[in-house]
Each structure stands twice: as C-alpha cells, then as structure tokens.
Image (spheres, rainbow, N blue to C red):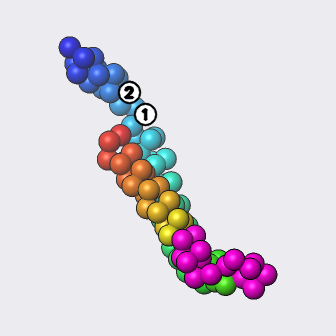
Amino acid sequence: MIAGGFLGIIHSHSDSVVALRIFFGFLLVVVFFSGLYIFRIRKRLFERDPQVTGDNYGARNLRLWQVILIWILAMDLLITALLTV
C-alpha cells in the first residue's frame, strides 16, 4: 500500500522530472568542468607557501585530497540525482 501511494506521487509529478533532469545535468556539467579547472591550476593552489611556517608536503597533499574527495562526492550526488529523478 505504501509503494502504491509512492508511485502515485511520482506519476503525478512527471512534469517536473524533465526540469529536474535539466537542472541536475547543468549542475553536473558545471561541477565537472570546475573540477577540471582546479586540476589544471592545482600547482598554483597547492604549492609551497613560503610565508607559512608549518606548510609541508603532507599538509599540502591533505588539502589537495580534501578538495578531490569533495569533488568526487559532488559528482556522485549529482549522478545519483540524475539517475533517480
């Protein structure tokens, strides 16, 4: 009974599915190309800063991987949203 009601709700909102797919598709393209841009300028963003005393290779590598993991999670979220809408 719950699944039937749930499917009824999805079926009655079929007009908004196209708009949501367009929106999530646009966001997917924006996030993808922003990730490529960050990858291209990663040397400028994550290179050694001589004014910071505690800036070592491990700290720079950790910052880079934090950005990479957030990008991967954003891509995963948007792809999942596209597939489930």
Amino acid type assigned to the residue bearing label 1 in the image: Ser
What are the residue bounds of the magenta stretch?
A: 49-63
54 to the left or right of 40: right
Q: Is residue 55 magenta?
A: yes
Identity of the residue drawn at 53% across and 65% down: 66
Q: Position of residue 18 (x, y in %)?
A: 40, 41
Q: Secondary structure at mark 2?
A: loop
Q: Position of residue 35 (x, y in %)?
A: 52, 68
Residue carrying label 2: 13
Q: Which mark is residue 51?
A: none
Q: Is residue 62 magenta?
A: yes
How packed mark 1 is, by other alpha carbons closer than 10 Å (few <14, some 14-19, many 20 or more), is: few
Observer-nearest residue: 75 or 44? 44
Measured along the vertical axis of the image, is residue 21 above or below residue 59? above
Measured along the vertical axis of the image, is residue 12 above or below residue 79? above
Residue 17: quarter of image: top left
Amino acid type assigned to the residue bearing label 2 in the image: His
Q: Which mark is residue 16?
A: 1
Observer-nearest residue: 74 or 62? 62
Residue extending furthest front? 54
Q: Is residue 29 visible?
A: no
Identity of the residue drawn at 46% across and 63% down: 69
Q: Are marks 2 and 1 in contact (CB under 8 Å)?
A: yes
